[in-house]
Image (cartoon, rainbow, N blue to C red):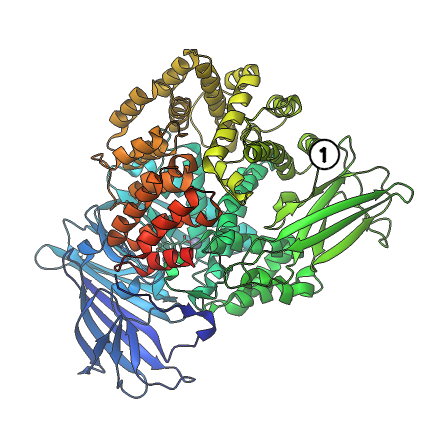
Amino acid sequence: MREGIAQAIKRADYAAPAYWIRSVELTFDLDPARTIVASRMRVERNASGNGGALRLHGEDIEPLRVLANGQSVSFRVEGRELVIDNPPEGDFTLEIRNTCAPEKNTHLSGLYTSGGGFFTQCEAEGFRRITYFLDRPDVMAVYTVTLRANKARYPVLLSNGNLVEQGELDNGRHYAKWHDPFPKPSYLFALVAADLVAREQHVRTRSGKDHLLQVWVRRGDLDKTEHAMNSLIASVVWDEARFRLPLDLERFMIVAVGDFNMGAMENKGLNIFNTKYVLANAATATDSDFADIESVVGHEYFHNWTGNRITCRDWFQLSLKEGLTVFRDQEFSMDMAGSASARAVKRILDVRTLRERQFPEDAGTMAHPVRPDEYVAIDNFYTATVYEKGAEVVRMMQTLVGREGFAKGMALYFERHDGRAVTCDDFAQSIADANPGSELARTLPHFKRWYGRAGTPHLTARGRYDAPTRTYTLALEQHTPATPGQAEKLPFVIPVAMGLLTRDGRPMALRLEDEPADKAAEERVLVLDEARAFYTFVDVDSEPVPSLLRHFSAPVRLHDGLSDDELLVLLAHDPDPFNRWEAGQRTALHRLLAAVRDGQPLQLDAAFVEAMRGVLRHETLDPAFKDLTLTPPTETYVAEQLDHVDPQRIHAAREAMVLQLARDLRADWEWAWETHQVGGAYSPDAVQAGRRALANPALQMLCLDATARGDVLWQGKAYQRFKDASNMTDRQGALWALLASHSEMADPALQRFHDQFRDDALVIDKWFILQAAAPEKDGRVFARAKALLKHPDFTLANPNRARSLIRTLCGENPAAFHRTDAAGYVFWAERVIELDAINPQLASRVARALDRWATLAEPYRSAAREAIARVAARAELSDDVREVVTRALE
Ligand code: 0A1
Ligand code: ZN
């Protein structure tokens, strides 16, 4: 924590380091209060550098001794650096001893304690909180690590690579020595010393090699590790099959820890995970928890190649590994989902996340390119832009070169760069070079604007049908609004997957003028690489309905001016399930926006209700797809369409829409509830989960409707289901139905839930989330959330718990948070300040809840600004929070 504003670090200033560290031997004497770290490094001068002082990073640690080539050498500590002004000539050995205090490390970055064990988190700049080092990703070294600790308290000692030695020491202590043969940047270092047990599995990969997979958890949690292990095995198999990337380690470990800032971390051979993304069984985890575990286990495993074997030259290139690895985990989950409709459901969920998290970010005060140009605190740039938009950029490359072409590009990327620290340019170049003649190769310099330019492009489409010539001309035009620091925007390369449908919903053959007659597919990709272009289709017998941006083929906002009638054609017939869903969302959105704009109570029309009934009762559509289509756009998404946001009005309109859908489709919801029950043993597979994904919202709708009519029958049924449910998805679904319908049975149910799961931290997190996320009514949700701060189970020190209450309220429940009396913003400011003293990374994530304050209508806008100014006025703030609030006020 420092006063004043830290210097921004700029991408343009990148320079290779003056020294390299090629190998390091670390010895840890682990003690919660005072751990001693001895480091012995082989240091080389960078031949192309000009030597000079050796400056090592170090933060919140104390030096004891520094030796160069075995001789003591003079050094000084200057801010967050240890400086050796006169290092020996040539290559030399540097030995440093220092201490750190793991139990005092509430930042959870570096070496810290959790649940009585030691754990590390080094990305991005945590290693310097362990020992002095060139803590930057282009410095790659071979690590040998010896851990020494009390054996009774810390029976398990783990680090990266292979276990080469272990044994007993005096005084009840023991040791383990690990060696990782792969040179790696310091951010991939990890150690664990704790009382843990493992689920183990041996697998044989295609090359015939045997590998040991382990999932380490606390005693008592072993029965919740089967799904994580299965997900890991599936990940190994998938990466070999899809990208020919084998497991390169003899041993691959996952360790679960209860205190963790993010989801998980891809440390070489020793992934450390938030318990939330490991532990699951039918009784404690929902279908979406199971899906999240599969995707995060996959994500971290896939990093072993995209991130670890080839890493980032500097942190501006973060999306090199994150965008690519998110793309890979998305593809993995889609392939695992199986059926075409289950794949579409996953794609819809991913696009929803992108539009609800990344689009606001790209339009807000923290907007930045996928490859940022500057940062103050790099931890602030683990964002939806770097991750999710970065994944869309990779997806567009795949669209432009085809699936096989992309696999070839990946192969070339590894051939060229394996074992190195490289840039986003290197990646794009490999994909393009492997596909000469592709649209990517043709447009590469322009395509790369996706990396360098922030902001979401607006894509406007207008079609004109000419009956006499039987032609249809589509005009596509793009425009991107200014973002902070980037006033002018040049055109992006936008792949637009599209089709044309007849008015009665049949796909048309697509042939552009001047194309041979045999070139007529029903779907194709137009590549818009200028501000504006025209495409004329020939042999078009009747005026078509265009279906544009299928599968969400580019991260843009589409304005195609389609009428409600046209959207209903797409909703009923589009062969692309994504656009079918999108058409339904847009019809709902039109109605919500109209109600919000005129401030009139929302009144649903028969055409809309009938269309929704058609989806709900459809004979072949997937139930999970039906749920997604019948769920109106979220309040956050509606807000994103407006320049002056009144969160209370949006809430009222959406609540009215949901209630009318509950009322008008009552018989259909009853049918859905009755016909989508799942019998037999629980499985999180897409078929079972899909049925629950429709049955649970049906129950909620029935409760809502009945309660509005003063009938408590469905509340009773929901309570019954809540009590008797055989799995957490149904139990939580029923509890949510009670909460969302403001039933009097919600409180007793919450009490019972707490009693039943009091010892399961992850379920207690859900208990907080449900209460903070409940639809606001008369300020009750806000009042409850405030009261929950004092609950004995609440603590700011555990990130999952803090997020469950605070992030949920401030970030995911707009109507409870944005209050005309400003109490939500006061709550926000107090929590940001409190949290910042404990854990700056977490505080800064909470601080981001007000990114979009400038679009709020009065009185919200002024009150939000005042709250931000109040935080910014504090003399003592972390760089993380300082950067967020300063940018918010710029
Ligand atoms: N690389 C991890 C995410 C991660 C980033 C930072 C962390 O601590 C500050 C922890 C994890 C991933 O993408 O999964
Ligand atoms: Zn990642």
**Beta carbon at label 1 within 8 Å of ligand 2:** no
- Nearer-the-camera pick, 833 or 375: 833
Left or right: 633, with 143 as reference point: right
The quadrant where residue 498 appears: top right
Q: Which residue is rendered at x = 45% and y = 38% of the image?
A: 291
Q: Which residue is rendered at x = 64% and y = 26% of the image?
A: 608
Please state, as top left, top right, bottom left or bottom right, where the N terminus lies in the image. bottom left
Residue 212 visible (yes or no): no
The quadrant where residue 164 appears: bottom left
- State ligand 2's quadrant: bottom left
Residue that protrudes farthest toward the right in the picture: 468
Please state, as top left, top right, bottom left or bottom right, where the C terminus lies in the image. bottom left
Mark 1 residue crowding within 10 angstroms, few (<14) / some (14–19) / many (20+): some
- Nearer-the-camera pick, 218 or 32: 32
Look at the picture and state if 171 lies above or below 96: above
Q: Where is residue 834 in the image (x, y as percent from the top left)?
A: 25, 49
Q: Where is residue 128 in the image (x, y as percent from the top left)?
A: 28, 66
Left or right: 682, with 397 as reference point: left
Q: Where is residue 405 in the image (x, y as percent from the top left)?
A: 64, 57
Residue 245 visible (yes or no): yes
Residue that protrudes farthest toward the bottom in the picture: 89
Q: Where is residue 244 in the image (x, y as percent from the top left)?
A: 54, 55
Left or right: 569, with 39 as reference point: right
- Nearer-the-camera pick, 386 or 860: 860
Look at the picture and state if 603 lies above or below 169: above
Look at the picture and state if 811 lies above or below 121: above
Q: Label 1 amino acid?
A: Glu
Q: How many marks?
A: 1
User: Element type at marker 1?
Assistant: helix
Task: Give the labeled residue for mark 1.
Answer: 566
